[in-house]
Amino acid sequence: MEHRLILFVFLLCAFLISAAASGMVIPRILSRSLKRGWLDKPDYRKMHSGYASRLGGLAFLPETLLSIAVVIAFYFLTQASDFFVFTPIPFPQWLFLLLAAAVVYVTGAIDDLKNLSYRVKLVAITVAAVFAMLSGLHVDTLDGFLGIHQLPVWLDCCLTLVLIVGVVVALNLIDGIDGLASGLTSLSLCYYGAWFVSLNEFSYALGVFALLGAIVPFFFYNTYSKSTRHRIFMGDTGSMTLGLALVVCALACHERSVEADNISFVHAVSPLLVPCLDALRVFALRILSGVSPFCPDKTHLHHKLVALYGSQNKARRIILLVAVVYVICNYFLAAFININILLLTESALYFLWNMSLSHRLKKRERSVQKQTK
């Protein structure tokens, strides 16, 4: 019991250190953006009406690494190894993970300043995915999803690459209203952090809570800022970094738990369902319409909810609630229901919900048109 308490103290310190650093850095990023003119202009597709900095995500990676370094140093200085064992991630693994994070971080930062094409960003995300795979993280097994268990090496590599790229792109796409991407990521990190603690994976738990601490101040600056003229967004720097972090957590959680046999593939990917299902739906609609899947529009779930309810706050709360419901359902039902039936049912319900939202929006548009005639 005592070693658990001390472990939680270290994790809390990681959270507080990164939160304090992020809380100090984010206002300075906004101030520097205003002085240098590094601002995002509103247009027909965007949800904000004033100028905004897209560089808030710059605070995520440095503050996370700073917090991890301080806590690890404190661990060795205080001889906390008498209470719990810190097993560091092997050097090649964390080096490749750091390279992957650096690629998406730098690419996102350049895009937030210079507006890169989606092709360049996609290549960069793919390179980052390869680095993440070289760290040793792979899917390995689907635990019976689609009737597949152990994967052959070639299929494992292909599926891992697609999963990493897909999750990074999905989180980037869903970052369309205040607090949505950061809120989804925060909930997901709490989930993964709890799993890592239960698996006695202190190294990953430390990284999770350090990153969570960096995100929380941004969430409040982004969502509850009193200024309506000058806002701060995480930009591609933040969304791509967070997307990579989430998929790494999912793969590590699944990999570490295969030996313990206490978490399945469906548990590992549960927090990723909402952004991934939305990205799949939007990509499918764009392809069927004969346009590029990366052509921006306003068909995302958050666009529909804002159009229907007229409130970003309400749209965000609904989506976060749906994400929590998915995680809870999968956590409790995966042991009793075949995961194919479970995931297919959840996907079908998600798409039916989207269809009902589209129907309600079209019905309201027709009603408005009749009133104006």
Image (cartoon, helix red, strand yellow):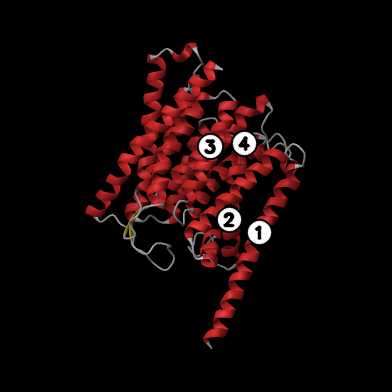
Do the residues under discs 1 and 2 have CB atoms within 8 angstroms?
A: no
Element on which disc 4 rests: loop
Badge nearest the viewer, 1 or 3: 3
Residue appearing at x 54%, y 20% in the figure: 4
Q: How crowded is mark 1: few (under 14 residues within 10 Å), some or many (20 or more)?
A: some
Image location (x, y in percent) of residue 184: 52, 46
Instruction: Decide if residue 26 is on the left or right side of residue 290.
Output: left
Which quadrant holds the N terminus?
top right
In this view, 275 is above or below 294: above
Mark 1 vs mark 4: which is more N-terminal? 4
Badge nearest the viewer, 2 or 3: 3
Mark 1 vs mark 3: which is more N-terminal? 3
- Whether residue 235 is visible to the viewer of this picture, yes or no, is no
- Whether residue 261 is visible to the viewer of this picture, yes or no, is yes
Q: In the drawing, what numbered circle is on residue 190?
A: 3
Tally of numbered tags:
4
Image location (x, y in percent) of residue 254: 62, 33
Do the residues under discs 3 and 4 have CB atoms within 8 angstroms?
A: no
Gap between marks 1 and 2 measured at Cα: 9 Å
Gap between marks 4 and 2 measured at Cα: 22 Å
Image location (x, y in percent) of residue 341: 75, 47
Mark 3 vs mark 4: which is more N-terminal? 4
Specify the amino acid type for callout 4.
Answer: Val
Rendered image quadrant of residue 256: top right
Of residues 96 and 249, which is closer to you in this image?
Answer: 249
Residue appearing at x 67%, y 38% in the figure: 331
The residue pinned by badge 1 equals 351
Badge nearest the viewer, 4 or 2: 2
The residue pinned by badge 2 equals 278
The residue pinned by badge 4 equals 139
Q: How crowded is mark 2: few (under 14 residues within 10 Å), some or many (20 or more)?
A: many
